[in-house]
Image: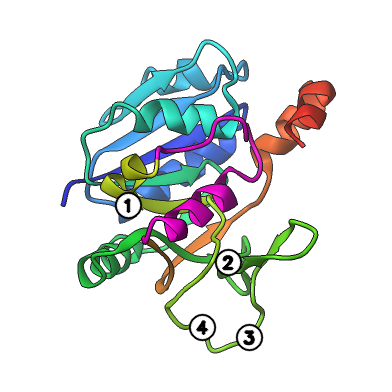
Amino acid sequence: MTHELVILSYNALKTLAAGLVTAKASFSGPVVVVDNASDDGTPQWLAYKKGLTVHLNQTNKKFTGGFADYLDVTKADLVTLMNCDCLCELGWQEAIEARFQSHPRAGLVAPLLLDAAGEMVVHAGGKPDLLGHVYGPSTVPWASTPVQWATFAFVTIRMAAYREIGGFDRQFEHYCSDSDLCHRMWVEGWEVWVEAKAKIRHLHMVSTKALQERDPNAYRACW
């Protein structure tokens, strides 16, 4: 299976630089950076980086549009979506690819998300509650398991399944696109998994905070 890693960035140059180092150290396939019209020097910095494919959006297409535009054209069998505020632990690629190989109906596979220090699991899948919110289980030990929903701060997608269900629903610009896509995967007979052998540290909401500080109206619109 061909596999690509796509990192989405918006006004988070320092965080992107750190995440990119861990991504390239832990991933053997092509690495793509999609930048959502950053004005903090990110496009200029990316111009000097070798071994990357770079897509520079002219406007901030938010989470869904930034990723979905790339997924519309990729030829890879698997695509990992990574927020720029993630730090990759070694071994995640092998663990996630093994899950896809052993479970032909796995449409999405997510890692355990850890806090920045790597000491606590902050997300391991979950299910929507009656208010429409989502949450992760807090029990241990952690095990690889099917889940109703997994956050897309970091997730790997089987593109055959993605195309079969029609891809992202773009009306969800920033939030809820992940829970929606997971739900439609299950409806169409695909599975959503959390792979406990794959671990990613998540700094959490770096680009969202940048949007909130620079354009409060756009941030409220996302919600």
x and y percentages locating residue 15 in the rendered image: 57, 40
Disc 4 versus disc 3: distance between alpha carbons? 7 Å
x and y percentages locating residue 117 in the rendered image: 61, 66
Disc 1 versus disc 2: distance between alpha carbons? 18 Å
Q: Observer-nearest residue: 50 or 111?
A: 111
Name which of mark 3 and mark 1 comes first in the sequence. 1
Disc 2 versus disc 4: distance between alpha carbons? 12 Å
Residue where numbered disc 3 is placed? 139
Name which of mark 1 and mark 2 comes first in the sequence. 1
Q: Observer-nearest residue: 111 or 25?
A: 111
Residue beneath the point at 61% across and 32% down = 12
Dot 2 and dot 4 residues touching (CB under 8 Å)? no
Q: Indicate the amino acid at tag 3.
A: Thr
Residue where numbered disc 2 is placed? 114
CA neighbours of label 3 inside 10 A, class few (<14), some (14 to 19), many (20+): few
Residue where numbered disc 1 is placed? 25
**Location of residue 83 with respect to 216 vertically, above or below:** below
Q: Indicate the amino acid at tag 1.
A: Ala
Residue beneath the point at 58% across and 36% down = 14
Q: Nearer the viewer, mark 2 or mark 4?
A: 4
CA neighbours of label 4 inside 10 A, class few (<14), some (14 to 19), many (20+): some
